[in-house]
Image (tube, grey):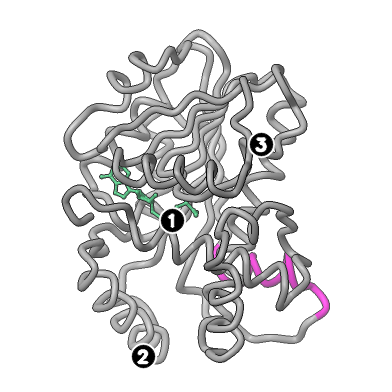
């Protein structure tokens, strides 16, 4: 992240969600606030997406990861979860359209500069901040999550669900494991959904080239990719941390679940979305 500046990749992810509402009519992930939170930038986001078909696969992946996380959250709330922590929230709109009201307390955690920028955007778009939401400005690389959440009034005795979408690649591996360790050790248990990518050197040539191009682009704007995981090693380390159930969808499982009627052949390497519960 560039010092004192909001995350540019947060804008990018929000632009993909907005374009998905128009170009795919929100078929995978419908978000009535996705265009509104971008304000005047929404039109540009959709136009640019339309003009660059190569962006489609990332747009679909972002729609899938958000849908997967919100479906898993809904199931967990049905089973007693009453706190949600959105790590690296960016321009995520869940808190502003949650149907759970006071039943689900929400914390949005993000880099202070990104969060301040989001709050300006919410105000400009006249999107009200619900009473159930608390903002927790935290830089994961400088402050610990338990410290930052405690300051925000997080109650560690409640069953909590964490989402961490589009964030893991930008954190050091140490910051990722300390976050997962915190979740795994919560007294009432924890649930987490995050996405990650296979190590670039394991990707087939075409995907590796696309990954390298994206990596160069994000490094240029000060948000370099730092962390990738090999799925088997990740699963066993998570089990050792205390997670008892790990569901990891790689590209073939994502295609089977979200595009069952399309005959597409996909590599087994690429972007993953993972849900784990202690
Ligand atoms: C690609 S955006 C994803 C935003 C959002 N989760 C989404 O899916 O639209 C990455 C997010 O990670 C946050 N982030 C990156 N490094 C961070 C750090 N060291 N501390 C806190 N947040 C960080 C950025 O501020 C940004 O909101």
**Label 1 vs label 3: CA separation?**
17 Å
With 130 as the anchor, is 198 left or right in this view? Answer: left
Q: In the image, residue 170 lies at what x, y percent?
A: 29, 56
Which label belongs to residue 73? 3
Numbered-mark total: 3
User: Where does the image place residue 208, in percent across and percent down from the top left?
Assistant: 34, 83
Q: Residues within 10 Å of mark 3 (few under 14, many from 20)?
A: many
Question: Quick check: marks 3 and 2 in contact, CB under 8 Å?
Answer: no
Q: Earlier in the sequence, mark 1 or mark 3?
A: 3
Seen in the image, is 1 located left or right of residue 87?
A: left
Region in magenta: 250-261
Location of residue 69 with respect to 134 vertically, above or below: below
User: Which residue matches tag 2?
Assistant: 205
Q: Nearer the viewer, residue 146 or 196?
A: 146
Q: Main secondary structure of the magenta part?
A: helix
Q: Is mark 1 within 8 Å of ligand 1?
A: yes
Q: Is residue 236 magenta?
A: no
Which structural element holds mark 1? Answer: loop
Look at 57% across and 72% down and name the residue there: 59
Q: Is residue 253 magenta?
A: yes
Dot 3: element: helix
Q: Residue at x 45, y 44 (%)?
A: 120
Q: Nearer the viewer, residue 94 or 263?
A: 94
- Residue 169 pos. (x, y %): 33, 58
Mark 3 → mark 2, Cα distance in angstroms: 35 Å
Mark before the other along the chain sequence, 3 or 2: 3
Label 2 residue SS? helix
Residue sitting farthest toward the right: 261
Which residue is identified by label 1? 166
């Amino acid at each position: 992240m560039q010092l004192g500046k909001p995350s540019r990749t947060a804008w990018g992810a929000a632009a993909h969600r907005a374009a998905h509402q128009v170009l795919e009519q929100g078929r995978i992930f419908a978000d009535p606030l996705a265009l509104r939170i971008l304000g005047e930038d929404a039109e540009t986001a959709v136009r640019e997406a339309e003009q660059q078909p190569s962006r489609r696969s990332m747009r679909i992946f972002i729609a899938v990861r958000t849908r997967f996380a919100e479906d898993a959250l809904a199931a967990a709330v049905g089973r007693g979860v009453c706190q949600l922590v959105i790590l690296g929230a960016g321009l995520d709109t869940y808190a502003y359209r949650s149907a759970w009201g006071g039943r689900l307390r929400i914390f949005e955690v993000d880099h202070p500069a990104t969060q301040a920028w989001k709050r300006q955007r919410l105000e400009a778009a006249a999107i009200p901040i619900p009473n159930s939401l608390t903002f927790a400005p935290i830089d994961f690389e400088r402050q610990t999550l338990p410290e930052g959440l405690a300051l925000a009034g997080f109650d560690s005795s409640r069953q909590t669900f964490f989402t961490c979408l589009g964030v893991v690649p930008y954190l050091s591996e140490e910051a990722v494991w300390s976050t997962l360790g915190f979740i795994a050790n919560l007294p009432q248990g924890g649930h987490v959904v995050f996405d990650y990518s296979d190590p670039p050197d394991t990707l087939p040539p075409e995907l590796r080239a696309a990954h390298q191009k994206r990596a160069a682009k994000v490094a240029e704007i000060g948000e370099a990719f730092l962390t990738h995981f090999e799925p088997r090693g990740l699963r066993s380390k998570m089990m050792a941390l205390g997670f008892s159930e790990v569901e990891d969808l790689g590209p073939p499982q994502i295609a089977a679940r979200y595009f069952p009627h399309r005959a597409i052949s996909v590599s087994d390497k690429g972007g993953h979305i993972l849900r784990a519960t202690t």
